[in-house]
Amino acid sequence: TRDRDLLVQRDAIVGLGRLGTPQAVEELHRLLTRREEPIRETAIRGLCQRHVSEATRYIDDESVVVRRSLAASLAERPTTDSVRLLEQLIVDRDPSVQIAAVESCRPWPDQWAVPVLYSGLIDGYLSTRQNSFDQLQRRTDTVSTFPHEASRNERQQAARDFCDQQQLT
């Protein structure tokens, strides 16, 4: 991770994640304390290679780049920990993090994706609600409407009704 070439550094950092030893995880946490966003973004990707639960402490990281990278890194790992993290990231204060969380669900089976998309329908920003509903419609091969701009309670009821009708719950 000390090479001057940024691509070599990034490959080495992600490699630490694949290695997954306690020393490698410790080094990734150390890298996540640095100031350089490209290093931190890559370190979170490395950490998510084998230790998704270790990434929980970065859910509120000050850097939108790190949080967005965390969301994107979870696409390959549909697990209970990943669902919990994405349910939090899908309501992140930055809309680009929310959208990354929606996109991370795309390759996941319904059992893992639906709870995250459901959270996005209810509590995400307008663009997140729209993207979450679009993905749910594609999953069910339906065309429907959703009250994206309604109150939270109305959205919650509409989301529950849609999921019940499509047997997604």
Image (spheres, rainbow, N blue to C red):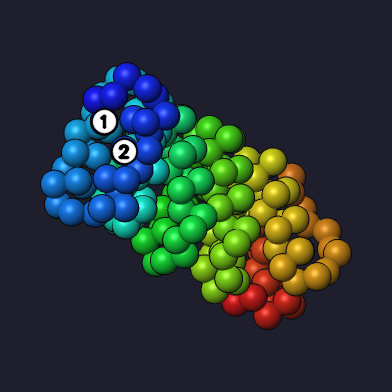
* Visible residue check, residue 119: no
| Image quadrant occupied by the C terminus | bottom right
Which residue lies at the image location 41% right of the left edge and 66% below the top edge? 79
Which residue lies at the image location 76% right of the left edge and 64% below the top edge? 138
User: Which residue is identified by label 1?
Assistant: 1
Residue positioned most to the bottom: 167
Q: Is residue 49 above or below residue 109?
A: above
Q: Are marks 1 and 2 in contact (CB under 8 Å)?
A: yes
Task: Looking at the picture, tell me which residue is in the foreground, 38 or 162.
Answer: 38
Residue positioned most to the right: 143
Say what amino acid the circle numbered 1 marks: Thr
Q: Quadrant of residue 40?
A: top left
Q: Residue 18 appears at what percent x and percent y?
A: 31, 53
Q: Residue 142 appears at what percent x and percent y?
A: 83, 69
Q: Residue 159 appears at what percent x and percent y?
A: 67, 63
Q: Answer few, some or many: residues within 10 Å of disc 2's Cα (few below 14, many 20 plus, some between 14 and 19).
A: many
Q: Does residue 149 appear to the left or right of 44 in the view shown? A: right
| Image quadrant occupied by the N terminus | top left
Which residue lies at the image location 74% right of the left edge and 45% below the top edge? 149
User: Which residue is identified by label 2?
Assistant: 13
Task: Looking at the picture, tell me which residue is in the foreground, 88 or 83.
Answer: 83
Task: Looking at the picture, tell me which residue is in the foreground, 144 or 113.
Answer: 113
Say what amino acid the circle numbered 2 marks: Ile
Which residue lies at the image location 21% right of the left edge and 47% below the top edge? 25
Dot 1 falls on a residue whose secondary structure is loop
